[in-house]
Image (cartoon, rainbow, N blue to C red):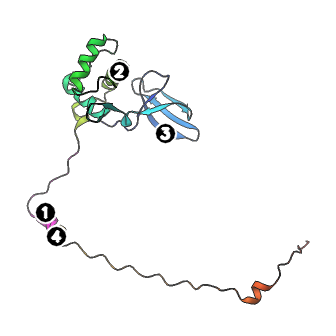
Amino acid sequence: MLLEKIISISGKPGLFKLVSQLRNGFIIEDVTSKKKVSIGNSSQVSLLDNIAMFTFDKEVPLFEVFENIAKNYDYKEAIAHKSSDAELKEFMTASLPNYDTERVYASDIKKLAQWYNILQKAGYITPDSFVKAEPETLEGEAAEEVSIEKEAPKKAAPKAEKPATPKVKATAAAKAAPKSTHRKQG
């Protein structure tokens, strides 16, 4: 799941995808309705990719919290953000067991549940969205060739030297000559 272009805008409900940049703002698209609008540079925007949740040990990226929620809810809609505080705390404990109960407020948990459900309805939450691309493994002769290349790296070709550019020195006579202050009339 790529959250790098998904944003939240202060004062606007929902989540948006950055489509393109303008000289004085951005074109955004509502993730659920797909309606495009423009916003100015003065809008307060938060990238979901830059948001993390506090635990007692560290900060956990929102992506990982969404992944935990998705697994707990079988990639379906989660608890409603308008649920009771007790239900929301239980939801948070299941999603991020070691969350910092003093620094993560009920309003944060409501927003988390709301954002998850918006992304789930918009098709961003799927089993494939959390699969990380693994490097391909080579087998047989191809693997041997790669390991040989690693052992004996190729020598880089020597850099061609640039010809020295001659430096022009001003003569003493040229330095001493007064500059003309007359302008040509024409």
Mark linked to residue 105: 2
Local secondary structure at mark 1:
helix
Q: Earlier in the sequence, mark 2 or mark 4?
A: 2
Q: From the viewer's perspective, tell me whether residue 126 is left or right of residue 179.
A: left
Q: Are marks 1 and 2 in contact (CB under 8 Å)?
A: no
Q: Earlier in the sequence, mark 1 or mark 2?
A: 2
In the picture of the structure, the residue carrying the numbered disc 3 is: 20
Magenta-drawn segment: 133-149
How far apart are the two marked residues, 1 and 4, measured between alpha carbons?
15 Å
Label 1 crowd (10 A; few <14 / some 14-19 / many >=20): few
Query: Residue flagged by tag 4: what amino acid is it?
Result: Glu
Q: Quadrant of residue 109?
A: top left
Q: Earlier in the sequence, mark 3 or mark 1?
A: 3
Local secondary structure at mark 3:
strand
How far apart are the two marked residues, 3 and 2, measured between alpha carbons?
33 Å
Q: Earlier in the sequence, mark 3 or mark 2?
A: 3
Mark linked to residue 1: none
Q: Are marks 2 and 4 in contact (CB under 8 Å)?
A: no
In the picture of the structure, the residue carrying the numbered disc 4 is: 151
Placement of 81 over or under 185, stated as above or below: above
Which residue is rendered at x = 33% and y = 23% of the image?
A: 112
Label 3 crowd (10 A; few <14 / some 14-19 / many >=20): few
Q: Quadrant of residue 128?
A: top left
As drawn, which residue projects farthest toward the left?
Answer: 140
Local secondary structure at mark 2:
loop
Q: Is residue 51 magenta?
A: no
